[in-house]
Image: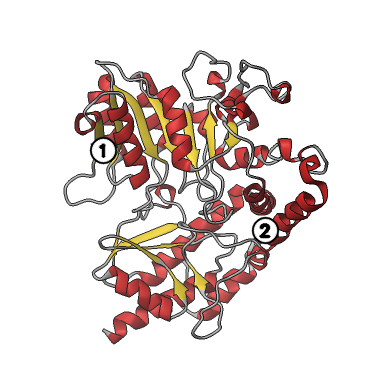
Amino acid sequence: MFLNFRPDETFARELDRADELADFRTHFHFPVNPATGKLQLYFCGHSLGLQPVAARQAVLTELDRWASLGVAGHFTPPHPWADYDADLRPLVAELVGAQPDEVALANGLTVNLHLLLASFYRPTRERFKILMEARAFPSDRYAALSQAAFHGFDPREAVVEMRPRPGEDLLRTEDMLEQLEREGDQVALLLLGAVNYATGQFFELAPLVAQARAKGCVVCIDAAHAIGNVPLALHDWDVDCAVWCHYKYVNAGPGAVGGYFVHARHAQRFDLPRFVGWWGHRADTRFLMPDTYELAAGAAGWQLSNLPILSLAALRASLDLFHRARMARLRAKAVRLTAYALALLDGLPLQLITPRDPAARGGQLSWRVPEARPLAAWFQEQGMIVDVREPDILRMAVAPLYTSFHDVWQLAQVWRARFTRT
């Protein structure tokens, strides 16, 4: 399937003509190069997704409803603000492999992580460690360190990392399983990114979750770089909880409202300690404003405040595209796009740190390069947006809703020209 790519431009055009998802590209705005006035090619969806064309009207619609309805907008169809997320949660659930009641839309990722850890990180003298991958996203690490300190533990002892073997960039599943077996009796929480933000490695979550739970560990997944990028099955994997953002591959806009997952087996766990707010109260009696709270069942019981409607409106525009495109088709195209990129770039003196096995990566490709930041700036001058993670990682991502095979072909030609010049 991936061995018959040709390097010529005609072949790239042929791939695009055969792509059943090609028309989705027209549903996004591409940035304009201020120096040339031309549209830029965008390979940065792992950091911030492009704006769906429909997002502007979706937000304007809610602004118009606010202007014309005032407070009545909370209960006026077609999308009353009081339960604006009712038809969005099933669409998000599709992307993370969950039941709709296991998903809620609220806050930002790290806020949600702290709120869930208040319930699910319950350390004891014997079992207090938080096990996470080395070079996890910094916010996850900061949260883990602060949670350990909050509970009175030395963060240097409580937060333990799973590291690659010497000279390697990627974690091996067998090493992660062995560490869980060796240290699991002291681990209160496995906190793992589904896709590592630096390398793009997609971890084998099913056996890791099974091993962690067999050792008595709670499992929390950060799906920020996974949702909308790779297929997820949070419910079937038996994950306890998970968090994510919607502004990367899900294209909901900068600082967009986040989401979280709580497994259905915890739906009636009203005994779990948690911080509460009025939006976590049962929806049917919430507006009676009782003096005491009755928690909503499921993920809704961890909500605090009412919904950020304008942010959810932009998310609605993107989720509609995902629902129409279907994750299985998007995944198949992403695998093909990344394989095509690697085929075109093979032979160049580049140190790839993303797995070559397509099952072990999403749409992101990362290379270790000298002078990564000047190189990213040079790509920008060529009309192509990529990004850097210090000190030496150049990251590029394909987003199958809007990345074309011809985009990838152009990227490869520019990079090859760079090596020809140097």
Viewer-side residue, 148 vs 219? 148
Q: Is residue 20 left or right of residue 2?
A: right
Considering the numbered disc 1 on the image, is that residue within a helix, a strand or a loop? strand
Viewer-side residue, 11 vs 220? 220
Question: Label 1: how many residues lie within 10 Å, few (<14), some (14-19) or many (20+)?
Answer: some
Residue 402 placement: quadrant: bottom right
Considering the numbered disc 2 on the image, is that residue within a helix, a strand or a loop? helix
In the rendered structure, find residue 55 and report the number of the disc placed on it. Answer: 2
> With respect to residue 322, does 367 lie above or below?
below
- Whole-Å distance between the Cαs marked 1 and 2? 40 Å
> With respect to residue 323, does 297 lie above or below?
above
Where is residue 77? Give x, y as percent. 83, 42
Q: Is residue 118 left or right of residue 28?
A: left
Question: Which residue has dot 1 on it?
Answer: 162
> With respect to residue 246, does 416 lie above or below?
below
Placement of the C terminus among the 4 image quadrants: bottom left
Q: Amino acid at mark 1?
A: Met
Q: Is residue 53 left or right of residue 182?
A: right
Of callouts 1 and 2, which one flags the residue occurring earlier in the amino acid sequence? 2
In the rendered structure, find residue 321 and report the number of the disc placed on it. Answer: none
Where is residue 293? Give x, y as percent. 61, 18
Residue furthest toward the top?
Answer: 271
Question: Label 2: how many residues lie within 10 Å, few (<14), some (14-19) or many (20+)?
Answer: many
The answer to whether the residue labelled 1 contacts the one labelled 2, judged by CB atoms less than 8 Å apart, is no
Residue furthest toward the left?
Answer: 166
